[in-house]
Amino acid sequence: MKVRKAVIPAAGLGTRVLPITKAIPKEMLPIVDKPSIQYIVEEAVASGITDILIISNRGKGAIEDHFDRAPELEERLLKGNKTALYNSVIEPTKLANIQFVRQKETKGLGHAVLCAKNFVGNEPFAILYGDDVIFNHGGTPVTKQLIDAYEKYGKGAVGMKECSLADVQKYSSMKTEHIEGRCYSISDMIEKPKPGEEFSLFSILGRVVMPPEIFDILEVTQPGAGGEIQLTDAMKELSRTKGVTGVDFEGIRYDMGNKLGMLKAIVDVALVHPEVAEGFREYLKSLEL
Ligand code: UTP
């Protein structure tokens, strides 16, 4: 069955980038002039996704406003012949059929995904972590790379990259066996491994495509690392039973949930942004680093 639905969990507290996330959702933090979540929605759409559910919570209303129409503002821009600005305001409202549901308690990524059960129904679906922006300029978007793997091997697919040992211990570790090209068979995995528990340096980074059976597993998944219901724990169960495909994806990933990742994204996008690239490059050159 074709993958046409996606879930974007965006209900985390964003404690790593406090204090900015006290009143502003981290998904709304700008990469130059667009909020990071718009880039994520654009990736989903470019991958063939038509229906998106964003998991939000109290205080994340700005995300809903961003994907909604803004009649007063639109009228003002039209009257002032500011067509380019008008188009930029309209663009996010037309990208896809976007719906929202609230995760009522912040009980972890697995719990957030479980909130999408009714929306997804009995179809395979993509999960795009709301704080991971991934670009593959001119190439196949990462979500599409995973959808292709899902369709080819008929198993859930996870996007992964080799990370430093310190990062693996913060994220997850995959037990892998190479299949072909960038694809691996995964037979086990662990969330936030303690020293010595790692299977490999491959960690899941920000994108997965799952069969609907993941919901049955999530419903009985107990709280794991950090006392939260972990999506990795449910995917571990799937990898041990049906198997999961790991895709060493092509693309650059920015962790918008940490301060350095945020800065890297802004600098890289600014350097190719038609409006500011030249001035920004000049400015960077003028800095005596
Ligand atoms: P993270 O653990 O990176 O996000 O979850 P966080 O909890 O906001 O981070 P810190 O540690 O407090 O800074 C990965 C993704 O899962 C979502 C987050 O919004 C993020 O996009 N998430 C996490 C939820 O939707 N609900 C949760 O209960 C936890």
Image: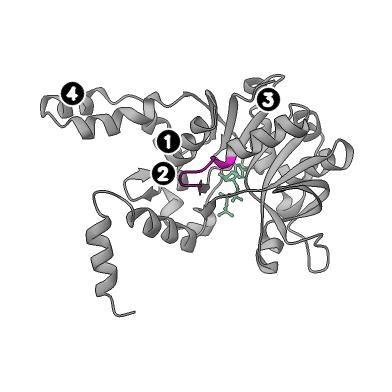
Secondary structure mostly taken by the magenta-highlighted segment of the chain: loop
Magenta stretch contains residue 218: no
Give whichever of discs 4 and 1 has the lower sequence position.
1
| Mark 2–mark 3 distance (CA, rounded to whole Å) | 25 Å
Q: Label 4 vs label 2: CA separation? A: 24 Å
Mark sitting on residue 117: 3
Image marks 3 and 1: residues in contact by CB distance under 8 Å: no
Please name the residue that numbered disc 1 is placed on.
Answer: 63
Position in image of residue 236 (x %, y %):
81, 44
Residue type marked 2: Met
| First in residue order: circle 4 vs circle 3 | 4
Question: What residue is disc 2 on?
Answer: 28
Which residue, as the protein is rendered here, is positioned at the far bottom?
A: 288
Specify start and end residues of the magenta stretch as a single range.
135-142
Q: In which quarter of the image is residue 144?
A: top right
Residue 274 drawn at (x, y percent): 27, 48
In terms of sequence position, does the residue under pointer 4 or pointer 2 come before the other?
A: 2
**Camera sees residue 196:** yes
**N-terminal of the two: label 2 or label 3?**
2
Is the residue marked by circle 3 packed among few (<14), some (14-19), or many (20+) residues within 10 Å? Answer: some
Mark on residue 75? 4
Element at badge 2?
helix
Quadrant location, the N terminus: top right
Q: In this view, does 263 lie to the left or right of 154?
A: left
Q: Is mark 3 on a helix, strand or loop?
A: helix
Q: Foreground residue, 268 or 177?
A: 177
Is there CB contact under 8 Å for labels 2 and 1?
A: yes
Measure the alpha-carbon separation of dots 4 and 3: 38 Å
Q: Does the residue labelled 4 lie within 8 Å of ligand 1?
A: no
Give the mark nearest the N terminus, 2 or 1: 2
